[in-house]
Image (cartoon, rainbow, N blue to C red):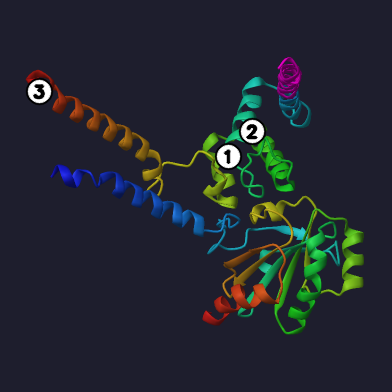
């Protein structure tokens, strides 16, 4: 009995090692999104193209699946991912844009020069919709399903690798 | 030997004054953030703002709280926090606002729930275990000492 007690420190060490091992394996950058499985928050905001016209979450008409992309002209990485968004849109993916904390003229100029991959872009001047969607920075891209629920969120640049690795497997299961 | 000693002395003094001035700067900057950018009309609100901005974690720069972060999203959340506090929202409502958007990740002080029982109770359990081991060892040792 006493001899077995000598193994207690070893057992504790093994438990501790397993915990450390698991923490080490997880991605420290990964933030669990609070919005997964939930509907897109309600909003009522002007469109970038036509600031007279208000759009709401009901205007996000989804056929199968769609993307919501948070972008801004002041955001450097958005510049990098933009061509890929254009090519995604050309291949038939519906993308809705949310233009956050931006200048209306600059946003229009951006779309005119670089091409407009969006069904429409919401003009979110205070970044309130971004905040409601739990955005930690721009760009971010959400995948939404037929019922308007959020299925996945990408923080950072969207590209071919991310699309194939993270988005396609979820879309194929729909 | 005396040559070796002198630079060390100067060095020590430098560090002492250096640390002091850094501390002074910290004190000054802390009061500046609270007072200048987020005005409140009473001390209770100001105190709540300070408490929350220290207890809430910045979703972007993960090892900083809102008070210590200059990230865009931290500024936004501080503005929201200011709004919620001036609107006299309860602590519970403020926590819910943050958690519904950014998850429990933003709470440096996690809620007491089924998946955090271990986190909250383990220290007490380990302390209890330590006390038990201590008592056990003492009780066991006593008769041995008597025998000798």
Quadrant in which the C terminus of chain B is drawn: top left
* Circles 1 and 2 on the same chain: yes
Asked whether residue A77 appears in the rendered view, the answer is yes
| Label drawn at residue B1 | none
| Label drawn at residue B85 | 2
Q: Please give the residue where the numbered disc 1 appears in the rendered image.
A: B94
* Circles 3 and 2 on the same chain: yes
Q: Mark 3 lies on which chain?
A: B
- The residue lying at 41 percent from left, 52 percent from top is A19
Asked whether residue A62 appears in the rendered view, the answer is no
Q: How crowded is mark 2: few (under 14 residues within 10 Å), some or many (20 or more)?
A: many
Q: Which chain carries label 1?
A: B
Could you say where residue A144 lies in the image, as x and y percent from the top left? 61, 70
Counting residues from the N terminus, which is met first, the one under dot 1 or under dot 3? 1
Of badges 3 and 2, the one in the foreground is 3
Could you say where residue A170 lies in the image, as x and y percent from the top left? 55, 76
Secondary structure at badge 3 equals: helix
Q: In this rendering, is residue A96 above or below B122?
A: below
Res B119 → quadrant: top left
**Do the numbered discs 1 and 2 sit on residues whose CB atoms are within 8 Å?**
yes
Q: Please give the residue where the numbered disc 3 appears in the rendered image.
A: B143
Secondary structure at badge 2 equals: helix
């Amino acid at each position: 009995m006493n001899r077995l007690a000598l193994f207690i420190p070893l057992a504790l060490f093994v438990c501790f090692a397993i915990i450390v091992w698991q923490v080490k394996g997880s991605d420290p950058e990964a933030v669990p999104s609070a919005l997964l499985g939930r509907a897109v928050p309600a909003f009522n905001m002007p469109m970038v193209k036509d600031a007279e016209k208000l759009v709401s979450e009901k205007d996000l008409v989804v056929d199968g699946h769609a993307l919501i992309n948070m972008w801004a002209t002041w955001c450097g990485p958005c510049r990098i991912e933009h061509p890929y968004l254009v090519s995604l849109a050309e291949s038939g993916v519906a993308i809705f844009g949310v233009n956050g904390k931006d200048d209306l003229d600059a946003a229009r100029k951006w779309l005119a020069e670089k091409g407009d991959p969006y069904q429409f872009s919401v003009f979110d001047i205070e970044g309130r919709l971004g905040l409601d969607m739990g955005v930690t920075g721009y760009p971010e891209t959400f995948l939404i399903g037929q019922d308007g629920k959020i299925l996945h969120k990408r923080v950072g640049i969207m590209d071919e690798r991310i699309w194939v690795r993270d988005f396609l497997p979820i879309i194929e299961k729909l | 030997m005396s040559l070796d000693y002198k630079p060390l002395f100067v060095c020590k003094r430098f560090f002492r004054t250096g640390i002091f001035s850094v501390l002074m700067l910290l004190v000054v900057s802390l009061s500046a953030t609270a007072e200048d950018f987020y005005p409140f009309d009473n001390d209770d609100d100001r105190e709540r703002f300070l408490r929350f901005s220290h207890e809430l974690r910045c979703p972007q720069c993960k090892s900083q709280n809102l008070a210590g972060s200059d990230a865009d999203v931290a500024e936004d959340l501080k503005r929201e926090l200011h709004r919620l506090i001036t609107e006299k929202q309860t602590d519970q409502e403020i926590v819910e606002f943050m958690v519904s958007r950014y998850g429990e990740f933003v709470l440096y002080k996690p809620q007491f729930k089924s998946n955090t029982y271990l986190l909250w109770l383990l220290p007490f359990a380990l302390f209890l275990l330590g006390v038990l081991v201590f008592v056990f060892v003492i009780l066991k040792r006593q008769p041995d000492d008597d025998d000798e």
